[in-house]
Amino acid sequence: MNDSILSPRPVAVPSPKRAPRRRPPSTQKHEDKRTAILRTAAQLFAANGYEATSLDMIADQLGIHKATLYHYVDNKESILFQCLVMSFGDLDAVIERMKDRSIPVLERLRIFVRSLAAAQNNDFGRCLVLVGSRPLDQAPGDSIRQFQRRLDMTVRDLITEGIADGSFRPLDPSIFAALLFGALNWVPRWHKDAGKLSIQQVVDSFMDLLTKGIEVSRR
Amino acid sequence: MNDSILSPRPVAVPSPKRAPRRRPPSTQKHEDKRTAILRTAAQLFAANGYEATSLDMIADQLGIHKATLYHYVDNKESILFQCLVMSFGDLDAVIERMKDRSIPVLERLRIFVRSLAAAQNNDFGRCLVLVGSRPLDQAPGDSIRQFQRRLDMTVRDLITEGIADGSFRPLDPSIFAALLFGALNWVPRWHKDAGKLSIQQVVDSFMDLLTKGIEVSRR
DNA sequence: CCTACCGATCGGTAGG
DNA sequence: CCTACCGATCGGTAGG
């Protein structure tokens, strides 16, 4: 499995003056277990849906009891929220890279699409795409949706920039973004790791289709 | 609301010899009530998810008691199944039309996409796209997924035909179908009836994008 | 004997 | 990390 979005885990930044460090143990073993819980939960949420996945199912899968989960997480909803946050991985850095005008806009779009596809086709990404933020309360759900709007805005800005510099023909950036996100968000529903095409190959084919179109060039 | 997918209800075919006519009342009023239950359920399923929607919520919305629902439907799962069947509406006829080679293949593809988009953006279609067949048992779920495979196959066949007759450039029909269904299936998640673009305008823009591509024509 | 529907509660299981 | 439970609510069904 691809663990890359988990690798750059931020090291705990020490507080200036003798931090209290209250409840959370924050040891490495505790963090590893917590991550294992989130990953297992993400898999089960993606497979069965949020409401149809019980905490007992998550605990059983890990060989622990349900009550033990509460040593690592606050409640069921916070598990989903943390899974969705994990799913964004390093996309924040990717969004920043998209502002680098030294790279041709079409090339930047390709990088973005590959990065997004990679993030959405692992345990946490599948949880985001297949479950989403609907089961969450207003506040946590809004923070997830806010990040997704940033992703959408990033694509629309690239298209607008590409039209302005003559890379793209005139078109509605919102329509393009809707088409692209729909296509990418649907991939986890049908792509099998055992299939003949990798995720990279699939999204590169998508980009090929979108740049050139399907009609034969006239003349 | 668009009731067109409900209109061609098959009239009850009488049995050859003095049919027993057992349990199902099958009166018009009974059928109307049953359809109202399915439509309300479809709305609530789409809004809250299947498991998070209780039979009490459906009954309350209709101003009746939960127990009364059981005079019209067998159980909760059969409600979802019937909603999904309704969502296919007259798409079966549309699939047949796609075999008419007197219509240019690109034009047939446009008709298909418009029909599918119309079917997926009403109460029952939103239930199909937002809930899907996952909560169903093996047998009923498989029958839903079988119809969806027919839709997928229809698109792939059109692309294959279009490549053969020179309408389309060489491309992977499966990739095109995956891209198209992803884009269309995502529409109910973001399109608002109050928005500036109608469903028709959205999917026509999609087709424009897919046929012509986004890059400026070179030379 | 039928339909349509009610108030009440069944056995089980949810998150905590 | 487990046993033992809670308040509530689930889908479904009883008698009338």
Image: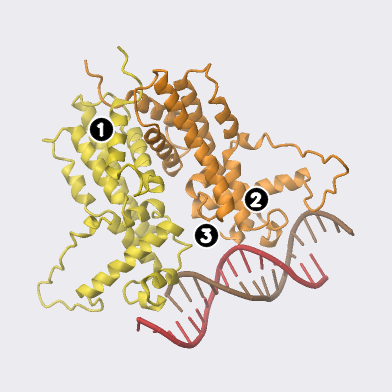
Chain colours: A yellow, B orange, C brown, D red
* Label 2 neighbour load within 10 Å: few <14, some 14-19, many 20+: many
For residue B134, say whether it is visible: yes
Q: Chain of mark 3?
A: B
From the viewer's perspective, is the residue at label 3 or at label 2 nearer? 3
Frontmost residue, A201 versus A194: A194
Type of amino acid under label 1: Ile
From the viewer's perspective, is the residue at label 3 or at label 1 nearer? 3
Q: Position of residue B187 (x, y in %)?
A: 43, 39
* Label 3 neighbour load within 10 Å: few <14, some 14-19, many 20+: some
The span from disc 3 to disc 2 (Cα, nearest Å) is 17 Å
The span from disc 1 to disc 2 (Cα, nearest Å) is 44 Å
At 13% from the left and 35% from the top, the residue drawn is A103
Type of amino acid under label 3: Glu
Element marked by disc 2:
helix
Marker count (numbered): 3
Q: Are marks 3 and 2 in contact (CB under 8 Å)?
A: no
The span from disc 3 to disc 1 (Cα, nearest Å) is 39 Å
Type of amino acid under label 2: Ile
As drawn, B170 above or below B8: above
As drawn, B69 above or below A78: above
Q: Position of residue A12 (x, y in %)?
A: 16, 68
* Label 1 neighbour load within 10 Å: few <14, some 14-19, many 20+: many
Q: Which residue is mark 2?
A: B37
Residue A159 is tagged as: 1
Residue B51 is tagged as: 3
Left or right: B166 in relation to B90: left
Task: Give residue A200's quadrant in the image.
Answer: top left
For the view shown, which residue lies furthest in the top direction? A219
At 75% from the left and 37% from the top, the residue drawn is B11
Q: Are marks 1 and 2 in contact (CB under 8 Å)?
A: no
As drawn, A157 above or below D2: above
Q: Chain of mark 2?
A: B
